[in-house]
Image (spheres, helix red, strand yellow):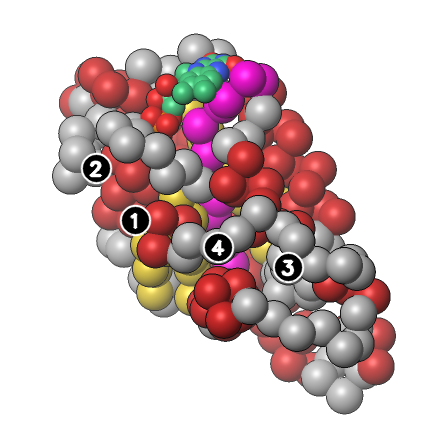
Amino acid sequence: MKLAVITGATRLGRQTPKQSAWIVNTASQLEDVEVEHVDLKDYPMPFFNEAISPRYNPDREIDPAVQKWLDKINEFDAYIFVTPEYNHSIPGELKNVFDYMTWELKRKPAAVASHGTVGGARAAMQLKEILSEGQAIVIPNFSAVHGISELITDDGVLDATAAANPYGPQGQLDALLAELKWYSDVLSAARTSAEASPALV
Ligand SMILES: Cc1cc2nc3c(=O)[nH]c(=O)nc-3n(C[C@H](O)[C@H](O)[C@H](O)COP(=O)(O)O)c2cc1C
């Protein structure tokens, strides 16, 4: 599985990279998993400004900054989007990158990891809807963290007590990764055998 862990917040002093680092650390211990951290901060782009919806514009002229993001996201066969909760939703910069996307996620598995005062649950539910419109296969499991600043270090190490709780964040994340890997293996094989199918677009 070639997995992207995407940090969906860019503000100064953000906490989200801690959750991403913890996910990367966990995933990199698994067999047959190649994991890369993709930080939205490295993909600055304007607010969506195209005259026609990208999915229905064969003559689309793509801003080089947007193309860089689309090329990167195309590289993977599984995704974990890591989001905080801002005003009961996802950050604007994360929504923006979806508005530029067409079929990059189609028939690929995607999962959500979130954090906030209620584990980022409201943002996570909205993000699942957005992923579904992006034609991703949305994994039901999700990883929710409450109290990220105390629970996870900058290097992505989860607090030992929390890590020992099988029903805590580590247990959730382990289950999420197992499911994501299962779907990724199945869907990668199916996409390869369906390569000639016109239904891919
Ligand atoms: C603009 C803004 C809005 C927020 N709204 C919510 C919210 O609706 N629910 C919540 O649980 N936390 C909310 N928070 C708290 C964030 O979840 C918390 O600050 C978290 O660390 C944000 O992720 P970040 O540090 O990576 O930006 C908000 C924070 C900001 C900056």
* Circle nearer the N terminus (1, 2): 1
Q: Are marks 1 and 2 in contact (CB under 8 Å)?
A: yes
- Give the vertical position of 59 relative to 103 (above or below): below
Say which element carries label 4.
loop
Q: Are marks 3 and 1 in contact (CB under 8 Å)?
A: no
Kindly identify which residue carries mark 2: 156
Q: Residue reaching furthest bottom?
A: 196
- Mark 2 vs mark 4, foreground winner is 4
Kindly identify which residue carries mark 1: 24
Q: Are marks 2 and 4 in contact (CB under 8 Å)?
A: no
Instruction: Kindly report the secondary structure that dominates the magenta region of the rendered protein.
Output: strand
| Crowd band around label 4 with a 10 angstrom C-alpha radius: few (<14), some (14–19), many (20+) | some
The residue closer to the viewer here, 32 or 152, is 152
- Give the vertical position of 137 relative to 105 (above or below): above
Q: Name the quadrant of the C terminus.
A: bottom right
Work out how far the residue at label 1 is from the one at label 2, CA to CA, in angstroms: 8 Å
Residue 107: image x %, image y %?
A: 68, 63
Residue 44: image x %, image y %?
A: 42, 53
* Circle nearer the N terminus (3, 1): 1
Kindly identify which residue carries mark 3: 101
* Circle nearer the N terminus (3, 4): 4
Magenta part of the chain: 78-88
* Circle nearer the N terminus (1, 4): 1
Say which element carries label 1.
helix
